[in-house]
Amino acid sequence: MENYSTKDIANMTDIAESTVRKYAQLLEGNGYVFNRNISGYRIFTKQDVEVFLEFKNVSKSDNSVEETANIIASKYTVKPNTAEDDVSANMQLGQGIERDMLTDLIKKVDVLTDMNEKQTKFNEELLKRLDQQQKYIDQRLEVRDQKLIESLRHSQEERQALLQIAAAQKEEKKKGLFARLFGK
């Protein structure tokens, strides 16, 4: 299904872009429905091209632009019917949604659903890896901390031993000095 922009409609119908927008507003005001994209801009279809061509031709008559919009909109707008077949036919016409568009939307939803499932699986795998990495880091930190503590203990023991040796040597020096002074 082909979609057209305001500029495309203007080129195809030989109507100024501002006039296309004005006609579209008048038609919508009278109940005609245009498709819109995600951003809210109108997306025109082949039927809409025919509507604008008809609008252009009818507006040359004695009717005002507002009357012309009302005439054309009423021709293409859904009117409630009690017969089930008529209701479904009118819904397709009035909403401007064709089967191709619905099929396309369903395909896009399926693609997005698949992408979402793949993304979810990827995220779960990534979380598992992050957990494994965190466990590894925690284990390595624990080993490092134990080695640091052992190294500190060993260093303190050596320092204590050196302090004891230094104290013993100091005592011996004191004894040696007293022994020399007092002759003992």
Image (cartoon, grey):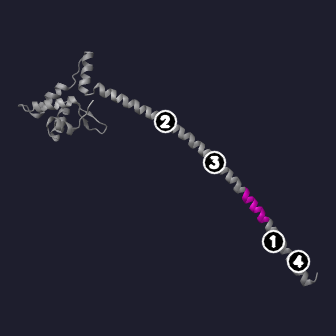
> In the shown orientation, is residue 98 left or right of residue 22?
right
Position of the N terminus, as image quadrant, is top left
Question: Marks 1/3: CA distance?
Answer: 41 Å
Q: Which sits earlier in the primary sequence, circle 1 or circle 3?
A: 3
Please, what is the three-letter code of the amino acid marked with disc 4? Lys
Which of the pair 107/134 is nearer the observer? 107
Q: Which sits earlier in the primary sequence, circle 4 or circle 1?
A: 1
Residue 53 visible, this angle: yes
Outermost residue on the left side: it is: 62
Q: According to the image, label 1 marks what residue? A: 166
* 4 vs 1, front mark: 1
* 2 vs 1, front mark: 2
Q: Which sits earlier in the primary sequence, circle 3 or circle 4?
A: 3
* 3 vs 4, front mark: 3
> In the shown orientation, is residue 11 left or right of residue 126?
left
Q: According to the image, label 2 marks what residue? A: 120
Please, what is the three-letter code of the amino acid marked with disc 1? Ala
Which region of the structure is painted magenta?
150-160
Residue 21 placed where, x, y %?
Answer: 18, 38
